[in-house]
Image: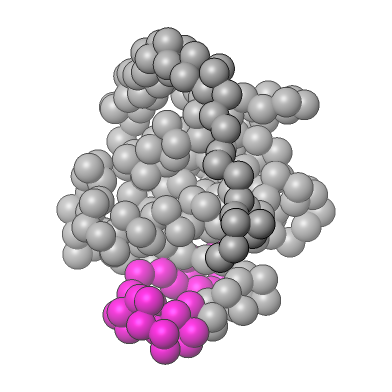
Amino acid sequence: MSNSEKKEQLQVPEKFDETHSSDTWSVFKIMGEFVEGFDKLFKIGPCVSIFGSARTPEEDPYYEMAQYAAKEMTKQGFGVITGGGPGIMEAANRGAQQGGGKSVGVGITLPHEQGLNKYVDEDYTIYFNYFFARKVMFVKYAQGFIVFPGGFGTLDEFFEALTLIQTNKVSKFPVVLVGTDYWGGLADWIETRMVEKGTIASDDVNLFHLTDDPDEAINIVCDFYQKHTLSPNF
């Protein structure tokens, strides 16, 4: 590379290191979020986390399916954990209340958000500033994931679960995608492209299930615990 092509050395601004003090204090804020989450949920009992888009309207078939799945899960003795927002989350919390089960809302503080939906139990209302702290609650206290069509956040939670199970960082638990029309392309890509390239093992495709039937999703979770002990995931 000639001298004329050389890039100028990165100039680090003096303020770059001035964040150290605030970063140190952030540790206590993060710790406080974990303490509050653990304190509220450690006695909640077995639950299922239900994920999906906040943008799903009430008239959407997936809204109805999420509401139904949550209601039926509570009849099986499970509580329901969601992100506490609108759309699929609202549907799941609504179904949990209709079934007489625990309805948990693990919310996140974001600009322009309206707060948690009205179907979250007051005793199980939690707000987080940090997505990573919030995701710990979804995994630690849920004995299964049922995932409806959603966006980046839903994908994040889905792949986080698969990664933790794959690497044995948590006990294995059932993960179910609902909606073959929506998730089918992703599932095919995982089962072919990723396996073909060797980026995952062929057995890793068995870490999740795909269905269009909410009753099948419910049965997958319940059947799993006919053979495994209910317990926190880590």
Residue 217 on the magenta span: yes
Please state the horizontal and vertical placement of residue 209, each as a whole percent of the image: 44, 72
Q: Specify start and end residues of the magenta stretch as a single range.
A: 190-219
Please determine whether, in this image, residue 38 is positioned above or below residue 195. Answer: above
Query: Is residue 211 shown in magenta?
Result: yes
At which x and y percent is residue 87?
Answer: 71, 45
Quadrant holding the C terminus:
top left
Q: Nearer the viewer, residue 204 or 119?
A: 204
Q: Which residue is found at the position 25% from the left and 51% from the top? A: 170
Pinpoint residue 35: horizontal percent, then vertical percent.
Answer: 33, 18
Q: How is the image coloured?
A: one colour
- The overriding secondary structure of the stretch rendered in magenta is helix
For image coordinates 67% across by 76% down, the residue present is 181
Q: Is residue 164 above or below residue 199?
A: above
Instruction: Choose between 14 and 192: the one closer to the eye.
Output: 14
The reply to whether residue 184 is in sight is yes
Q: Residue at x 67, y 50 (%)?
A: 53
The x, y position of residue 62, in whole percent, is 69, 59
Specify whether 194 is left or right of 112.
Answer: left
